[in-house]
Image (cartoon, rainbow, N blue to C red):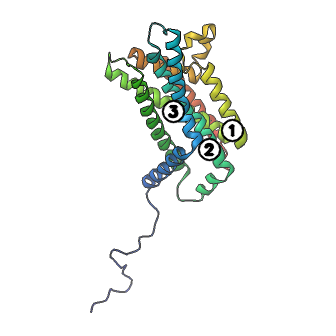
Amino acid sequence: MSTAPAGARPTGTFTPAPGGAGLGRMVLAQARMEARLMLRNGEQLLLAIVIPVIVLVGGVAAAGRLGSTFEGHAPVDLLTPGVLALAVMSTAFTSVAIATGFERRYGVIKLLGSSPLPRHGLLLGKVLALLNVVALQLVVLVVVALALGWEPSLASPARTVLGLLLTVGLGTAAFASLGLLVAGALRAEATLALANLVYLLLMAGGGVVLPTSTYGAAGGLIQWLPSGALGEAMRSTLVHADIDGRSLLVLAAWAVLGALLTARTFRWE
């Protein structure tokens, strides 16, 4: 019978392997948990799926009864890009702000701060979870729009896909940074009230669902809001197969501004 030399580590199936997981595995685990929590929350589903579907179906039905068109386009062709932009805004801004605000209140972020997951890993996990939820809600809304007769422009598929990716990416970054700014500076109850109020105001008058040209003289100002820029960029891509560079730059500027302000004001506890 042989014996292991003194000081040698045992090997085998049940050999202990102490030590933390790599950053990539921790971020992916955090992203999976964040995404599951968002999809299990009824209020988050209401903002992400139910309200955009109601706006799309209700808008198309109302326009059909009135026999109206938008700038020569069928109502569903012009409303669908706006509703997709609304869905991005609802998840990236309102859902992120409310969820993060209550995580601060209940000490979840403080608890995670004591884990091996670093702060930038926590933010990366939130970003990945957010992108997954945005992709899922866009798939659901596209299926509903196609069932209603939506015909997106196929004049330049490559340009359309590139414009869509840039619009969703920059729109998510802009609104997520603003959502974290609100959640990191205010109490949870104030964040809940302000995030819902801003969401309703931008949905009704922020140029996200309807083109900024329908707001008359105010459209010139609304197109500089993140909601107006997101809606215009989405319509340019899916209605005209074009990339709206000005609106994308506006979204990028809001993303940078929101990130800088969040970095200076966010309170983890």
Q: Give the Cα distance between marks 1 and 2.
A: 9 Å
Query: Where residue 172 is drawn, which disc sits there?
Result: 3
Q: Residue 142 lies in what quarter of the image?
A: top left
Q: Is any part of residue 131 visible from this angle?
A: yes
Which residue is pictured at 63% across the width and 40% down the height?
Answer: 98
Residue 124, how many percent across, how many down?
50, 45
Q: Secondary structure at mark 3?
A: helix
Amino acid type at circle 3 is Thr
Q: Give the Cα distance between marks 3 and 1.
A: 19 Å
Query: Where residue 100 is drawn, which disc sits there?
Result: 2
Q: Give the Cα distance between marks 3 and 2.
A: 16 Å
Q: Secondary structure at mark 1?
A: helix
Q: Quadrant of the N terminus?
A: bottom left
Crowding near the residue tagged with mark 2, few <14, some 14–19, many ≥20 C-alpha atoms within 10 Å: many
Q: Earlier in the sequence, mark 1 or mark 2?
A: 2
Residue highlighted by disc 1:
191
